[in-house]
Amino acid sequence: MFTELAPYRNFRDGLAAGELRYMQCEGCNQPFFYPRVVCPHCGGTRLAWHKSAGEGAIYSLSIIGEGEASYIVALVDLDEGFRVMSNVESTGEAPAIGDRVRARAVEARETAPARIVFDRLESAS
């Protein structure tokens, strides 16, 4: 259900439950992310929450830093039709554009709120 005045809170509650929640406009049927009170596609206000399966493909990425201190920031196109910017946590070979990834909720720490990160899925070779 759409919480009209607190979409950010509903999103955060989803993270606490280990879910990636996104919104979809009931007027134009477009999914979108980051939570908001007005559809960015048509300006509609009839919005519904959905739980993402969390799988998608890397659209773009940047590797920042070198070695052990590096981290990966990526734009990920989720299968439901919306895009998210987050980190890709990778061991071994660096991820590439087009690689399949899966979202994972990371619990809040003293210095950082809960967030979504992505892990690269193994290819089906």
Image (cartoon, rainbow, N blue to C red):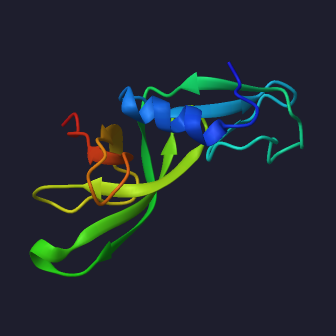
- Residue at left offset 21%, top offset 63%: 94
- Residue at left offset 34%, top offset 49%: 99
Q: Viewed as shown, does residue 90 lie left or right of 22?
A: left
Q: Is residue 63 visible?
A: yes
- Quadrant of the image for the C terminus? top left
Q: Position of residue 122 (x, y in %)?
A: 20, 39
Q: In the displayed image of the protein, which residue is found farthest to the front?
A: 110
Q: Is residue 20 visible?
A: no
Q: Position of residue 93 (x, y in %)?
A: 15, 60
Q: Relative to residue 116, is residue 75 depicted above or below?
A: below
In this rendered view, identify the residue nearer to me: 5 or 73: 5
Q: Position of residue 87 (x, y in %)?
A: 35, 58
Count of labels shown? 0
- Residue at left offset 31%, top offset 46%: 108
Q: Relative to residue 85, is residue 121 depicted above or below?
A: above
Where, by quadrant of the figure, is residue 69 drawn? Answer: bottom left
